Image (tube, helix red, strand yellow):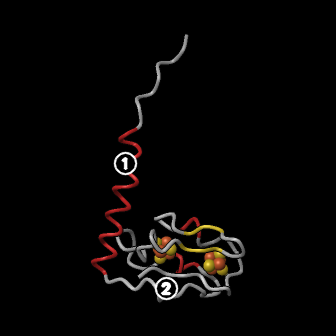
């Protein structure tokens, strides 16, 4: 499952840096979670880190993205591959100018 931030969010900024998948971002009014990046922390931690730190408990399961553990693992692996890809296609650094 992916998680979702409800409108009870108080924009305290605490969850955003805790997400290992960079799935949390500041939306128009409150913080939001990209469901395509949220693995419920599968692959990184035993518990969802954003839920652990949220002071107002406003991060339930997103009912539109109910996924089983295997699907979350697949999402985690896909994200890892995507994260590695840009580095592999980077050109070598240019020689320093004298
Ligand atoms: Fe990020 Fe984990 Fe929260 Fe999903 S559950 S938004 S991966 S911190
Ligand atoms: Fe909102 Fe909770 Fe994240 Fe704070 S920790 S920004 S209240 S979702």
| Residue 54 falls left or right of residue 47 | right
Residue 98 vertical position relative to residue 14 in the rendered view, above or below? above
Where disc 1 sits, the SS reads: helix
Q: Which mark is residue 62?
A: 2
Residue 46, percent from left and from top: 38, 77
Q: Which mark is residue 85?
A: 1
**Residue drawn at point x = 36 percent, y = 58 percent:** 80
Q: Nearer the viewer, residue 10 or 36?
A: 36
Q: Position of residue 3 (x, y in %)?
A: 49, 81
Q: Quadrant of the N terminus?
A: bottom left
Tell me if 67 is positioned left or right of 64 in this view: left
First in sequence: mark 2 or mark 1?
A: 2
Indicate which disc residue 10 carries. none
Report the front residue among 18 and 91: 91
Location of residue 16 with respect to 90 vertically, above or below? below
Q: Is residue 81 left or right of residue 34?
A: left
Q: Within 10 angstroms of label 1, few (less than 14), some, or many (20 or more) residues?
A: few
| Residue at the spot 51% in from the left edge and 18% down from the top edge | 96
Residue sitting at 30 percent across and 70 percent down? Answer: 74
Judge whether 46 appears above or below 78 on screen: below
Q: Residue furthest top?
A: 98
The image quadrant that residue 18 belongs to is bottom right
Q: Position of residue 36 (x, y in %)?
A: 45, 70
Q: CA distance from mark 2 to mark 1?
A: 28 Å
Along the horizontal axis of the image, is 28 left or right of 82?
right
Q: Nearer the viewer, residue 57 or 95?
A: 95
Instruction: Name the secondary structure under disc 2.
Output: loop
Percent of width and height locating residue 93: 45, 27
């Amino acid at each position: 499952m992916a998680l979702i931030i409800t409108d009870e969010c108080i924009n305290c900024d605490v969850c955003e840096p805790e997400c290992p998948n960079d799935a949390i971002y500041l939306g128009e009014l409150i913080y939001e979670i990209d469901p395509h990046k949220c693995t419920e922390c599968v692959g990184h931690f035993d518990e969802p880190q954003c839920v652990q730190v949220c002071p107002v408990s406003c991060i339930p399961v997103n009912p539109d993205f109910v996924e089983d553990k295997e699907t979350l693992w697949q999402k985690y692996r896909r994200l890892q591959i995507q994260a590695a890809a840009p580095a592999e296609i980077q050109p070598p650094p240019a020689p320093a100018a004298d």
